[in-house]
Amino acid sequence: MESQDKLKEIVREKYAAIAQQDKETNQSSCCGSGCCSTEVYNIMADDYNQLEGYNPDADLGLGCGLPTQFAKIKEGNTVIDLGSGAGNDAFIARHEVGEKGKVIGIDFTPAMIEKARANAEKLGFNNVEFRQGDIEKMPVGGNVADVIVSNCVLNLVPNKDGVFKEIFRVLKPGGHFSISDIVLEGTLPDNIRSAAEMYAGCVAGAIQKQTYLELIESSGFTNITLQKEKKIVIPDDILSNYLSAEQIDSFKQSGTGIYSITVYAETPCCDPKAGCC
């Protein structure tokens, strides 16, 4: 696998290109990565059409869940969307927070920020803003968010532990997050794990589900809850770019599972060392 800086640059380049594509083009590939499946459907994403605040122009078909559906967002909340893309989840969150709330989208791809800002301008939203930055070092102060959401983004970040610590820093005491992401049970074949293209495609960057949940706990979060889980099946025509027919059969027989999960967790109401929780 490439170095962390190299992986970030690969992801930036891939998602800059995706920002210029329409949803139908993205849906024909693995999480929009361009890995050329001939089975034209989105492997990862769920259907947003039934959610209030949904705007088709902001939906690039890149998610792997519906975190805003589970995020318990209230009117007047401040919500941060990590890896906000063209603004899809941010605009749904905006519907929930109302005029009195605020939504901040963070993305490190300039083309995505540009597209999201254009969408917000078109919708006339003055309480939604998009900031370019790395979610390992968010361009926001501490204790500012009531809720954090993210959709199929942390798997693209090499330093996942650092992101969870940043989430803890940015959330207010008693705040919470709802994050949809890709995790594993079992071991991916080396050819997939070492493929930068599959990293950008949301698969090779995934870690073990148990490790993922342990990172959340070790960062200080409480009430960790698995809100949703579904198995992801990668079509053979994508796998064939990296594995032989024999290796594909072996992979399918290995019991390795690729899953989309949506996880909820809370920050303590105050510093537990102070004895006030």
Image (tube, helix red, strand yellow):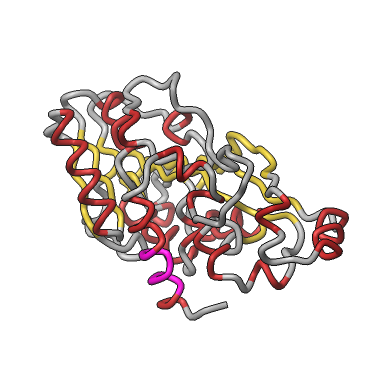
What percent of the width, then of the height, locates residue 70? 48, 30
**Residue 223 visible in the displayed image:** no
- The chief SS type of the magenta part is helix
Is residue 134 in the magenta section? no
- Could you tell me which residue is drawn at 26 percent across and 30 percent down? 94
Closest to the observer: 191 or 139? 191
- Could you tell me which residue is drawn at 63 percent across and 42 percent down? 39
Vertical comparison of 55 with 216: above or below: above
What percent of the width, then of the height, locates residue 8? 41, 70
Closest to the observer: 8 or 181? 8
Is residue 9 in the magenta section? yes
Say left or right for 52 vs 121. right
Q: How many marks?
A: 0
**Please, which residue is most extreme toward the front here?**
38
Quarter of the rendering occupied by the C terminus: top left
Quarter of the rendering occupied by the N terminus: bottom right
Vertical comparison of 3 with 213: above or below: below
Say left or right for 66 vs 56. right
Q: Which residues are magenta?
A: 7-13
Say left or right for 142 vs 228. left
- Could you tell me which residue is drawn at 45 percent across and 38 percent down? 24
**Residue 109 visible in the displayed image:** yes
What percent of the width, then of the height, locates residue 214? 60, 57
What percent of the width, then of the height, locates residue 252? 82, 54
- Could you tell me which residue is drawn at 16 percent across and 26 percent down? 100
